């Protein structure tokens, strides 16, 4: 029998960017708050001196072990889903700070078009532009409404950037100037300009200079050490929750952090339609606890947010055959359906690619969102074209070889040494749309260590998936040719989703909107049917934008925090629904 603890104002499940922001805002507002984190209590100091490519880039040791807890995956409804057990195939955060510690730092806001994608697509191209298999939804919030929350997150995180000439004018400049421009970035920018595009420096969560954020947290200037993506930063130069929002929350006595606290259920009273708290296991002792709370916040990454609602029997499960139900719909992400591009090999140019930072890069957004005419194209949306100098490491860069080179032996060694400094990659970070077919539910066969069903993902490509990638590869090739590469290798366009959830860009399943018939949460990420339950993170995205997701997760977390404070005052649903709620 679980031990019942004293009631608090707010319990937050998961302590990455999303949970860390909510915890910090609640702590600052004087609310009695508990943060429950499944992983270990990692601190920034734990990363000092750990520049180990084998452990972190090859064995993915910073990420969740998948032996005990993972997802299962299939393409078709009549297939048996199988569990994903190798960390290369699923990169989710394991400890305090979550995936937000090993992120690279690439920072983009989503576009006004993307928040109102259905309405704006119909307005410009007509309803026929939306394919029958695509479940295209507006977000229930506009870019103008999101702007102050983006700004708040960017200042907390201390983002280093410059204005993208295509993007809406910012109210305030980026908090820090952009990172350095290396010769490879300059070459990319010059080529883009010659082609008539508008290049700019990618905004980065890597600090271009020492910075103190509005909460008084200090970050140091980046050393361009290269061990950035998939690593924690030992210089305190990468903006992450361990350096910002978690210490801010911990400064307040009304906030308590409990690590190795694995939440298994949201406790839900069907009569009052209220969440009463959460049930968790203390993984140090194996004991179960019930943490009652006035407000429950799920911020445990898209997979766990989906699964905890299903295990707790909250909301109606989505059914792809009837297209009815809410929880699990619009499950999506950027997997092998995005980030295709080209690699250019330069015989007479050398670049020092072994210095770099996770988000050091140059980009264009001329082919993002609806910034270009889609009338004659068989897809909607777009993305950035990026060249990133995230920093090579010895083992991973040894595969810079042209097609036709043997994969071992003397010729392989000669070629891989030759191109170690002479190969550049550019890619297209395209939107991925949601399709009626794709969703999550509980797996009927596979279970975790506590006997609870794993989350099952059913996912396949839909109309436009391959076409947008082909378009991106063609545009990347044009730029690479202009850059003067002697040989260009195009990424091949995959036939189907290959069950590799790499890259950490997962979304949907608990989506936001203005209509409870088609969304689970309102634009404060408050559940339509359970007023005191807020589900925060990428799980709220109805579609995946054409850029990296974290700034939008950060902005929505600030928006949700504001909503939680309002709820604690008025104890009611914060948004008037467009239609009558039907999914109890
Ligand atoms: C290699 C890599 C590079 C990336 N680079 C970028 C980038 O450049 N730009 C960008 O925008 N995004 C990037 N991302 C994505 C980014 O990491 C995520 O968008 C971000 O971390 C999401 O934040 P979150 O708070 O929602 O989730 P997380 O940071 O993962 O936090 C969720 C937390 O919940 C905890 N948790 C899970 N289940 C439970 C449970 N049952 N009980 C208690 N706690 C639980 C987890 O342990 C974790 O700490 C990258 C991801 C990866 C993997
Ligand atoms: S590149 Fe910069 S931000 Fe990234 S880990 Fe190194 S010092 Fe930290």
Image (spheres, rainbow, N blue to C red):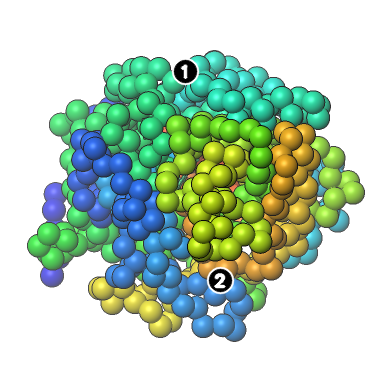
Visible in this render: residue 8? no
Gap in angstroms between the C-alphas marked 2 and 1: 41 Å
Q: Please give the label number shown on residue 176.
A: 1
Q: Nearer the viewer, residue 271 or 408?
A: 408
Indicate the quadrant containing the N terminus: top left, top right, bottom left or bottom right.
Answer: bottom left
Q: Residue at x 81, y 37 (%)?
A: 372
Q: Is residue 359 left or right of residue 167?
A: left
Q: Please give the label number shown on residue 236.
A: none
Q: Is residue 510 left or right of residue 571?
A: right
Q: Position of residue 243 (x, y in %)?
A: 30, 31
Question: Which residue position is annotated with label 2?
Answer: 458
Q: Residue at x 20, y 55 (%)?
A: 260
Visible in this render: residue 2? yes
Q: Is residue 496 left or right of residue 194?
A: left
User: Helix, strand or loop at disc 2?
Assistant: strand
Q: Position of residue 232 (x, y in %)?
A: 32, 40
Q: Earlier in the sequence, mark 2 or mark 1?
A: 1
Circle 2 crowding by C-alpha within 10 Å: few under 14, some 14–19, many from 20: many
Q: Nearer the viewer, residue 274 or 174?
A: 174
Q: Position of residue 32 (x, y in %)?
A: 21, 37
């Amino acid at each position: 029998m679980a031990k019942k603890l004293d009631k608090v104002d707010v319990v937050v499940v998961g302590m990455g960017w999303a949970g860390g922001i909510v915890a910090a805002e609640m702590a600052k507002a004087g609310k009695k708050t508990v943060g429950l984190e499944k992983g270990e209590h990692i601190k920034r100091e734990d990363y000092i001196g750990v520049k180990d490519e084998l452990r972190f880039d090859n064995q993915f040791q910073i990420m969740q072990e998948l032996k005990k807890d993972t997802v299962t995956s299939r393409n078709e409804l009549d297939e048996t889903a199988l569990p994903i057990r190798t960390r290369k195939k699923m990169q989710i955060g394991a400890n305090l700070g979550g995936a937000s510690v090993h992120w690279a730092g690439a920072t983009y806001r989503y576009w006004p078009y993307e928040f109102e994608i259905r309405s704006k697509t119909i307005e410009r191209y007509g309803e026929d532009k939306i394919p029958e298999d695509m479940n295209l939804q507006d977000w229930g919030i506009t870019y103008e409404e999101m702007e102050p929350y983006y700004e708040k997150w960017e200042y907390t995180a201390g983002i280093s950037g410059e204005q993208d000439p295509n993007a809406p004018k910012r109210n305030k400049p980026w908090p820090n100037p952009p990172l350095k421009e290396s010769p490879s970035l300059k070459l990319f920018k010059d080529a883009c300009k010659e082609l008539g595009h508008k290049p700019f420096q990618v905004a980065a969560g890597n600090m271009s200079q020492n910075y103190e954020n509005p909460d008084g947290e200090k970050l140091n200037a980046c050393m361009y050490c290269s061990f950035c993506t998939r690593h924690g930063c030992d210089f305190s130069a990468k903006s992450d929750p361990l350096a910002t929002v978690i210490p801010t929350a911990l400064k307040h006595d009304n906030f308590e952090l409990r690590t190795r606290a694995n939440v298994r259920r949201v406790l839900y009273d069907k009569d009052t339609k209220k969440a009463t708290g959460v049930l968790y296991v203390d993984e140090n002792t194996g004991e179960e606890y019930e943490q009652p709370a006035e407000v429950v916040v799920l911020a445990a990454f898209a997979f766990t947010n989906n699964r905890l609602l299903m295990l707790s029997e909250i909301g109606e499960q989505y059914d792809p055959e009837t297209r009815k139900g809410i929880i699990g719909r619009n499950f999506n992400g950027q997997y092998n359906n995005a980030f295709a591009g080209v690699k250019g090999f330069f015989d007479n140019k050398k670049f020092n690619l072994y210095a770099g930072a996770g988000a050091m890069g140059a980009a264009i957004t001329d082919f993002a969102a609806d910034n270009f005419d889609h009338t004659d194209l068989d897809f909607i949306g777009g993305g950035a074209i990026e060249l990133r100098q995230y920093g090579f490491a010895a083992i991973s860069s040894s595969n810079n070889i042209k097609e036709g080179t043997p994969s071992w032996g003397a010729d392989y060694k000669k070629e891989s040494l030759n191109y170690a400094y002479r190969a550049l990659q550019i890619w297209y970070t395209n939107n991925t749309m949601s399709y009626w077919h794709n969703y999550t539910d509980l797996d009927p066969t596979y279970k975790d260590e506590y006997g609870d069903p794993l989350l099952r993902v059913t996912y396949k490509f839909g109309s436009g998936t391959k076409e947008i990638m082909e378009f991106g590869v063609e545009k990347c090739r044009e730029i690479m040719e202009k850059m003067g590469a002697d040989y260009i290798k195009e990424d091949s366009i995959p036939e189907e989703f290959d069950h590799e959830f790499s890259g950490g860009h997962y979304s949907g399943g608990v989506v936001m909107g203005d209509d409870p018939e088609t969304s689970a949460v309102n634009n404060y990420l408050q559940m339509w049917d359970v007023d005191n339950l807020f589900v925060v993170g990428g799980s709220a995205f109805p579609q995946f934008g054409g850029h990296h997701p974290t700034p939008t997760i950060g902005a929505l977390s600030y928006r949700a925090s504001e909503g939680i404070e309002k709820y604690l005052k008025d104890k009611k649903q914060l948004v008037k629904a467009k239609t009558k709620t039907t999914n109890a």
